Image: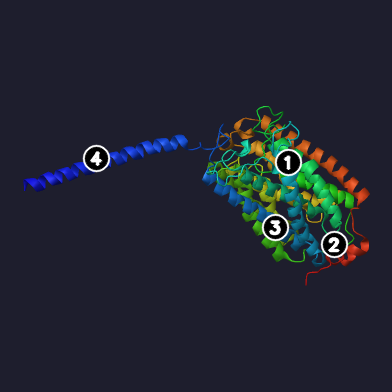
Amino acid sequence: MESGKSTRQRLVTLVMVLLGVALLYLAFGDIAFADDAPPACGGKILEKCTPNSGDTAWMLTSVALVLMMTIPGLGLFYGGMVRKKNVGDTIMTSFAVTCLITILFAVLTYSLAFRAGSPFIGGLDRMFLKDILSDIGKGGIGNPNPLAATIPESVYICFQMTFAIITPALIAGAFAERMKFSAMLWFIGLWAIFVYAPIAHWVWGPDGIFSSGNDAAWVKVLDFAGGTVVHINAGVAGLMCAIMLGKRHDTAPAHNMVLTFIGASLLWVGWFGFNAGSAVTAGMQAGMAMLVTQIATAVAGFTWMLVEWALKGKPTVVGICSGAVAGLVAITPASGFVGPVGAFAIGVAAGVFCYWGCTGLKRLFSYDDALDCFGVHAIGGIVGALLTGVFAVEQYGGTAGVLEGNIGQFFNQCIGVATVFIYDAVVSLIILFVVKMFVGLRVSEDTEREGLDLALHGEVVQ
């Protein structure tokens, strides 16, 4: 009995010793691992650090959502509103622009827009995307762009690339059914370099003249996801195209409202990546941006429907879809700065003013903006940018608006809008004149009558 008891005691002692050794190993092993592990990316740690996996996953999702906005979303939205004989050219434009801008962005415009250089334009250190470290085989270690400190730079490049793609693709709504395909490619390519890249740098670049994150900015303009950079920019360029090309020889109602409905629906869903993704983190600001995007879009679509119903006697599918897109446009600059109340106000304003922009304003000045690029995107972008200065909530985005006593922010927004409008209009006209001189802008009258699909692409929609 005594021998058995002694054996059990020795076994218990041995087990306790082994457990103690294991715990010490784990404790010191954790300390050693923590010492050897690369730090988390963020703040001032931007080299040889580990990106945040949650932020990276959300941004990868956002890239896919925003690309979906152009192909297929915008292609179907625009394709349903043109005449059947021009559907192929319309969707081809969206697809070709996606390819062209991807190439230009990788070669040049990413570096010009999103790298430090001067207050007016970025540097050339990322031409051809050189010096981007591969994360593969290095334990997930990377060197992020300071503008997106917690995700790999490759992911940030893809995200901003989708913005650079959809912006010039929107312009096509103004010159639909009458611009040469070759002229379109030249114009879009030059515009991306000389208009989009500088304006993106002004507003979002690390040292841009309007960048709200730049302590040395001349004027701090709030633009969370692209009211000035994307929508006013595209809308003004579209107006210049419409003026230079002149009116179509004949017009007709949208040929397929179902295509337009599907396209608008894809735009609505994709816009969550557009706005909430612009937080560049999977945090509270992204959540608020998503909420206000949904509210403003629904309110604007419903408001447009009621206005059209009251003035024309019938609500239309194309109308409510256009109103929803107007709401998406208007909430874009505000999405990271306002709350639900601001979203309601912006939605109502977008529905009313964009309806007027697509009807009364267009009749007043008699320009042929075929698919209302200026009426929806420029007018909606202006409404949203200005009301951002009114409804911005410091608790949400770090900057107060007029309602919280910061009247100066509204004037900052006015300066940003006016500067972008004037620069875009002047440079777009110069590019159009150059393209017209060397390539020509408009198809012949016979081609326009026959339809661009068969004349320019040799194929038709059956």
Measure the alpha-carbon separation of dots 3 and 4.
65 Å
From the top left corner, tell me how far across and down residue 424 is, in percent: 80, 41
Q: Which mark is residue 71?
A: 3
Element class at badge 2: loop
Q: Which mark is residue 251?
A: 2
Q: Which residue is mark 1?
A: 127
Measure the alpha-carbon separation of dots 1 and 2.
44 Å
Tag 4: amino acid: Val
Measure the alpha-carbon separation of dots 2 and 4.
89 Å
Mark found first going from the N terminus, 1 or 2? 1
Q: Which residue is mark 4?
A: 17
Q: Nearer the viewer, residue 129 or 272?
A: 129
In screen coordinates, is 302 left or right of 250?
left
Tag 2: amino acid: Thr
Q: Which class describes the residues within 10 Å of circle 1: few (<14), some (14-19), or many (20+)?
A: some
Q: Nearer the viewer, residue 291 or 271?
A: 271
